[in-house]
Image: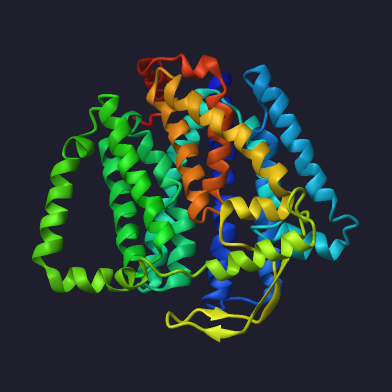
Amino acid sequence: MKKDRQLELKKSNVIILIISVASTSIWDLLYFNFNVFSGGKLIILWLISVAFFIFSCYKLLVNYKLGNNYFKVIFYIFFLYTLFIIFRAFPFSLGDVIKTYMISDSQFWPLIIPLFVFFDKRITTVALFIKYIYILIYPFLVLNLIYHKLILEQLSAELVIHTLVYPLGFFLLNARYVSNKKVNISFAIIFISFVSLAYLARRNAVVTLTGFMMSAYVLNTMNRSKVMLFRIFPFLIGIGIFCFFTFTTVSEKITKKLDERISEDTRSGLFQQFFFDLTHTHSMALGKGMNGTYYCPIEGQVTDDGVVISDETNRSIIENGYLQLMLKGGIIYIVLFLLVLIPAAFYGIFKSSNQFSKACGVMILLWLIDMSIYGLPTFCLHYIIIWICVGVCYQKNIRDKTNEEIQEEFQKINLV
């Protein structure tokens, strides 16, 4: 009876975590794309979501065993340096805390999310997280039913897919532990999103979703998963290629923008401005702190896709994950970041006896690749999953479990 009560509490806390994080992007979508409510109400809704997020973190970030001595030393150095990055912005006013840090997905929260290495690493808890990632399918479907052009417009498609579909990649990598029906539906949603992003020519996002689909196939095949989808995956690819070259009118419409942009260079000038600023402000080694910006004047304009770009002189976002780390904490921050994540990916992929740990390692590896293309650390479930995976990959007792032992843990929450 006590175990059942504890399991129910875990379920509630995991659901609160997932919904609280995903809801912040939904509020942004409703405000910026649909003007459903005022800016003041947006702040209130964000703060409510953040309050629930903090509550769930208090309940779920409870495992302080960091796995091995290397990880213990390097992670604490990494996080102490992160605190240095945060406190370089001191003093904070109350207005800064509320309007800049609490309701921004790219300034304060990405520096705190690495604490998810302390996520409760009992298999049932992580399995619950995987199980309830699936619930993100429902708001995805509802939003698209309400506004059928949602995934056909650049800003809304990127926001919705990044928020609600990217986490399904982790679900797909763990396909052997979940039902075929849920795997098939998750794959269908990811594939629909892939087509949407190809149509909108979002190159980095197309690479991300391709990475999830191909990695899930390889991982499930190598681990002799019995999931039917991956047994017929080559056949499905064959059908896709046949349809692409047979129905040329449709395929050309889908890939027209992507073909035009595939070799387009949209960032060289931005990167040049970035490095020029950091070099001349002597910020390459230590970065500019949590509030760091770089000089890059951009004139306001409306793109062909209808995206409104505002006038800016100093930008706080650079469209590359590694350079974003450099802006905040310099080369030192990038090095510490890689010293944490690269060994985690190695342990998960090559030093594991089960698909669950390998899936965690693959998630980290895909993220490291994504960051070289875009992959910005933000307040989102995708980035939270990465740090949960880091914590798992350093746990030898989890890596040494067999697939059968992991399966038994997943069965306890009726996931299979």
Percent from the top left, x then y, of residue 133?
45, 44
Where is residue 384 drawn, in percent x and y? Answer: 57, 43
Residue 8 visible from this viewpoint: no
**For this rendering, which residue is in front, 309 or 113?**
309
| Residue 66, visible in the rendered structure | yes
**Image x and y of residue 14, in percent:** 56, 39
Residue at (59%, 44%) from the top-left corner?
Answer: 17
Q: Is residue 319 above or below residue 326?
A: below
Q: Reply above or below: 164 against 276.
A: above
Residue at x 51% of width, y 56% of height: 374
Quadrant that contains the C terminus = top left
Residue at 35% across, 59% down = 193
Quadrant of res 342: top right
Q: Quadrant of the N terminus?
A: top right
Residue visible at 54% across and 27% down in the picture = 392
Front residue of this view, candidates 201 and 380: 201
Task: Look at the picture and state if 99 lies above or below 306.
Answer: above
**In this rendering, is residue 354 above or below 57?**
above
**At which x and y percent is residue 371?**
52, 50
